[in-house]
Every structure is written in C-alpha cells, then in structure tokens.
C-alpha cells in the first residue's frame, strides 16, 4: 500500500509498504510523479520481480568508481594506467550524480564532449571501463540499476598506426635517450627495437628468465595471458650484458611504466621527432622481423600476437625493397 505525504511546498514523499518486502521511500517534486513511482514499485512487488534500488539511489558514480579502483583495478596488469583513467573520470561533474539517475543520454553527452578533446580510441577506452564498472556493481555488488553505457554507440576505433622510423630518427632518438636523467630509458628503447616487446614486458624482465648463453628471454606473464620466449639478437645481448645486476633480480629495477613514458616523451622532444609513440617502436621492430625474412608464424611466436589478422598490419614492407625482389 502506498501513502503520500507533502513535505514543504515543493516536495512529496511516497512510501510503499508490502508484507515481506522492505519499506520503499522516495521524494518527488510533484504528487503525480510520486504516484507514478509508487504504482511501478507495487506492480513489481505483485509480480515478484521487485529489487531494491535504494543503494543505487544513494551511491554516487564517484563512490562506485572508488570502490572499483580499490577492489578490481589492482587485479589487472594495466593497473597503473587504469588508475589514472579512473581518477580522471571521478573528477567529472557526472561523477557527483547518483548512479540510478544516470541515463544513456548523459553518457552520450559525455562521449560527444570528450570526442572534442581526445581521440575516439581514448573515448572508447573510457566508456568500456565505465561500462565494466557498472556491470561489476550490478552483478557482483548487488547495486540494482540499468547500465547506461549499453544504450549508446561506442566511437569507432582510430585508424591503426603505421608509423615507422624515418632516416636519421633512430640515431637522434638513441642520442636523446642517452642524455635522459632516467638511466634506464636508453636500454629500454634499445631492447624495444631489438625484441618487439611491449613496454610493460620489458620493465618486468627478471634475470632468472634471461638466458644469455641460449640468447632467450622468457616472459611468464604477458598482455594476452600467455607466456612466451623471445629470441635475443646480438645487439640485445650486448645491451643486457651492460646492465648492472640488481638485488631484486629485475633487469630494469625500480622503474614504472609512467616514469619511462614521461622520460621517453621528453627524449623524443629533444630529438626533434614528431608523432613517435613508444608503442611505435614495437611496430618498427615487428616490421624489421618481416624484413629479415621471417614468416608470419615465426614473427607471431616472437611478438605474442594471437590474431594473425592483427599482425598483418605490421607488414608495411618498403616498396623499393619488394621491387628489388621482383627483379
């Protein structure tokens, strides 16, 4: 049974009582809105499909994201970068809203405004993370509300990058890395170009997994969840031999991906190179493997690509080199 009580000149409180169900209370600006809400709750209770939305109506998006940051993010490989993304989302005006009040149109507005400032891929990652946080809250935390990210269209991915090092850029880049305050930047960049390893894989390298005599590096934990063994070139062996041994067993000790990222950006700027991201070094190294004559399966075993269609975009062989092969 529903009862209604006027609270001040602009508020109406609705209460729904039913045996075997928790008391439901909500305040509205008009009696009509209160009656409409109460009828909907009573229908759900009569059908036996009612679930309390009280927690969703008292939990802000910021509070939900904070819990996600504390409980879910630490279990992920990309915890550091995801932490930064979540903290940025927590600063949004939308984060002050109760999750029960957030609709698809609110998420669509956020998407469109964000697209004016950053790339579609960045916005898509924001929305995927936001959507997963909503799903975890619904399915695992028992906070009952509709996931508004499901109601909108995600931005299309950016066109895959095919940036390669141009003439003289490698020399300038390595010289700038040698001048960096971070002493680990140069070997990390050198190894990236020689092994096609991801930045996180390089930083997690341990001496116990490096076999200099057999010229291999074992990666027990990679982005795709599978281990792999990477062959080491002569240059990679030389770089590794020159590194000091740490007590903790890390080849690149005490360095975070964020520290390498910032040092790399400064080095690229000093070298006068435009639009060269760290991940482009993996693309460059992978393409060089094809240029050395390795087939797609051999390259996949080195780089760890599970989807060979993804690997094909790395085969940007130079037209003049192909022309020489044609005769």
Image (spheres, rainbow, N blue to C red):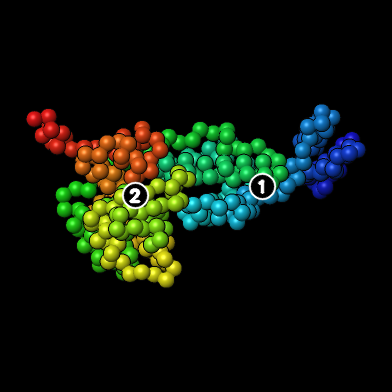
Label 1 element class: loop
Please, which residue is most extreme toward the left here? 327
Q: Mark 1 — residue?
A: 98
Front in this rendered view, residue 311 or 35: 311
Badge 1 or badge 2: first in the primary sequence: 1
Q: Quadrant of residue 206?
A: bottom left
Q: Quadrant of residue 49?
A: top right
Side of 126 where 229 appears, left or right: left
Instruction: From this view, report whether residue 31 is shown above or below residue 192.
Output: above
Residue 3 location, x and y as percent? 88, 39
Q: Do we see residue 181 in this rendering?
A: yes
Q: Residue drawn at (41%, 52%), measured in percent from left and top?
A: 219
Front in this rendered view, residue 80 or 4: 80
In the rendered image, the quadrant that contains the C terminus is: top left
Front in this rendered view, residue 219 or 80: 219
Q: Mark 2 — residue?
A: 230
In the rendered image, the quadrant that contains the N terminus is: top right
Residue 145 location, x and y as percent? 68, 39
Residue 212 location, x and y as percent? 30, 59
Side of 155 where 212 appears, left or right: left
Please, which residue is most extreme toward the bottom here? 247
Q: Quadrant of residue 70?
A: bottom right
Q: Residue drawn at (21%, 62%), measured in percent from left and top?
A: 175
Q: Residue drawn at (39%, 53%), measured in percent from left and top?
A: 218
Front in this rendered view, residue 89 or 266: 266
Residue 228 location, x and y as percent? 40, 47
Q: How many circles with numbers are drawn on the protein?
A: 2
Q: Do we see residue 266 in this rendering?
A: no
Instruction: From this view, report whether residue 175 is shown above or below residue 219.
Output: below
Label 2 element class: strand
């Amino acid at each position: 049974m529903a009862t209604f009580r006027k609270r001040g000149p602009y508020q109406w409180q609705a209460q729904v009582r039913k045996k075997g169900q928790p008391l439901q209370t909500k305040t509205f600006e008009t009696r009509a809105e209160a009656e409409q809400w109460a009828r909907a709750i009573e229908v759900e209770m009569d059908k036996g499909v009612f679930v309390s939305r009280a927690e969703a109506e008292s939990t802000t998006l910021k509070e939900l994201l904070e819990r996600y940051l504390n409980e879910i993010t630490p279990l992920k490989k990309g915890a550091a970068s995801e932490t930064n993304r979540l903290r940025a989302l927590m600063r949004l005006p939308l984060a002050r809203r109760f999750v029960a009040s957030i609709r698809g149109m609110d998420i669509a507005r956020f998407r469109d405004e964000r697209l004016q400032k950053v790339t579609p891929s960045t916005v898509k990652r924001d929305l995927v993370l936001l959507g997963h946080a909503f799903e975890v809250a619904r399915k695992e935390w028992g906070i009952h509300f509709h996931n508004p990210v499901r109601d909108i269209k995600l931005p299309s991915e950016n066109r895959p990058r095919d940036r390669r090092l141009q003439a003289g850029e490698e020399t300038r880049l390595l010289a700038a890395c040698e001048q960096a305050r971070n002493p680990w930047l140069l070997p990390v960049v050198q190894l990236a170009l020689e092994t096609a390893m991801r930045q996180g894989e390089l930083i997690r390298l341990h001496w116990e997994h490096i076999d200099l005599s057999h010229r291999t590096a074992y990666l027990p934990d990679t982005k795709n969840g599978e281990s792999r063994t990477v062959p080491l070139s002569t240059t990679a062996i030389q770089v590794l031999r020159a590194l000091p041994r740490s007590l903790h067993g890390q080849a690149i000790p005490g360095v975070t991906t964020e520290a390498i990222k910032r040092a790399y950006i400064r080095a690229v700027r000093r070298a006068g190179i435009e639009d060269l991201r760290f991940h482009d070094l993996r693309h460059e190294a992978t393409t060089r493997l094809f240029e050395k004559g390795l087939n797609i399966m051999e390259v996949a075993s080195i780089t760890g690509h599970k989807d060979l269609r993804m690997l094909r975009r790395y085969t940007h062989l130079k037209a003049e080199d192909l022309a020489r092969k044609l005769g």
